[in-house]
Amino acid sequence: MTHGSFFTGIAGFDIAAEEAGFENVFQVENNDFCQKLLNKRFPNAERYKDIYEFNGYKYVGRMDIISGGFPCQTYSVSGKGKMDSRLWKEMFRCIREIKPRWVVAENVLGLVTRKGGVALEMVCADLESEGYTVLPPLILPSCAIDADHRRERVWIVAYSFGLGCKVQEDNTGSSTKENRHKEGTVKKRFKWSSETAPLDSYSNTFLQFESEFCEPPIFGVDDGLSKRLDEDRLKSVGNTIHPGLAYRIFKAIKEIDNLILR
């Protein structure tokens, strides 16, 4: 399966995709420090700096999954809370052009809580307008996979099996993947469940301390990060996702594809 990412940062999604066995085809990231890191870590991926100049038509019929944690300052607690949707609209424009089979988007909890969830509804409505089925959004914290911090994020997963990569015919002359999806197959053969991992871990002493005092238990640092980190690295770590969460979502997507499109 092929994967492309927007607002790539230090490649949280791309690391997860690689671990899940996907090919990272392209990355869109405007930060110079992150660009240097991506050039070294993913030399075979095509890279772009400005999403406003990105032309998705080049990738029509080539992409299985598009991911992106569109910038969250307008929805975060530390942001000003203004409903500026320009960067999501640009990512959505690229999705319309590329027409991937799967879309995985991520944002802060404020996407749900601010303005009565209008921003989340906008994202889901945009995807549905292009024929995507949007699965119930998931609110997953990093502690769900035993990280020592909460870091709650909203995950949006959408699919349309009429789009995506064109599959080559096998030696019998019939397509091995296209036109085999029937409505309801996902619900019947695969269940998305929050029971696969706890949403919190109250036995974790780090989380207990954070919950009571609203500060990391190791003073002078943020969730165990050294304060000797320079500004570029600290900002990049703060903006990224936990690859372990994205990996579990990608792994589930791969299982669904194997069930429906095999």
Image (tube, rainbow, N blue to C red):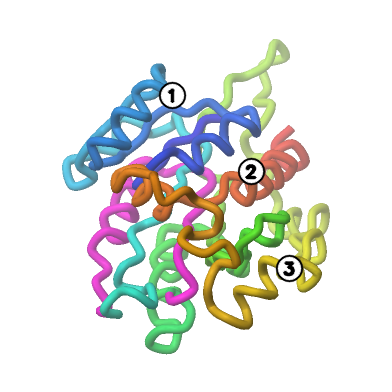
Give SS at disc 3. Answer: helix
Please provide percent x and percent y for residue 85: 27, 68
Q: Is residue 216 left or right of residue 127?
A: right
Instruction: Identify the residue at horizontal 46%, vertical 68% (top origin).
Output: 108
Neighbourhood count class around disc 2 (C-alpha, 10 Å): few under 14, some 14–19, many 20 upward: many
Where residue 238 sits, quadrant-wise, is bottom left
Q: Which residue was labeled with disc 3?
A: 205
User: Is residue 253 in view from this perspective?
Assistant: yes
Cα separation, mark 2 vs mark 3, equals: 26 Å
Q: Quadrant of the C terminus?
A: top right
Please provide percent x and percent y for residue 170: 68, 16
- Numbered label attached to residue 114: none
- Numbered label attached to residue 41: 1
Q: Quadrant of the N terminus?
A: top right
Residue type for callout 2: Tyr
In the image shown, does 201 or 109 lie closer to the viewer?
Answer: 201
Q: Is residue 106 magenta?
A: yes
> Is there CB contact under 8 Å for labels 1 and 2?
no
Q: Is residue 146 magenta?
A: no
Cα separation, mark 1 vs mark 2, equals: 18 Å
User: What is the magenta range?
Assistant: 82-110
Instruction: Identify the residue at horizontal 50%, vertical 42% (top origin).
Output: 13
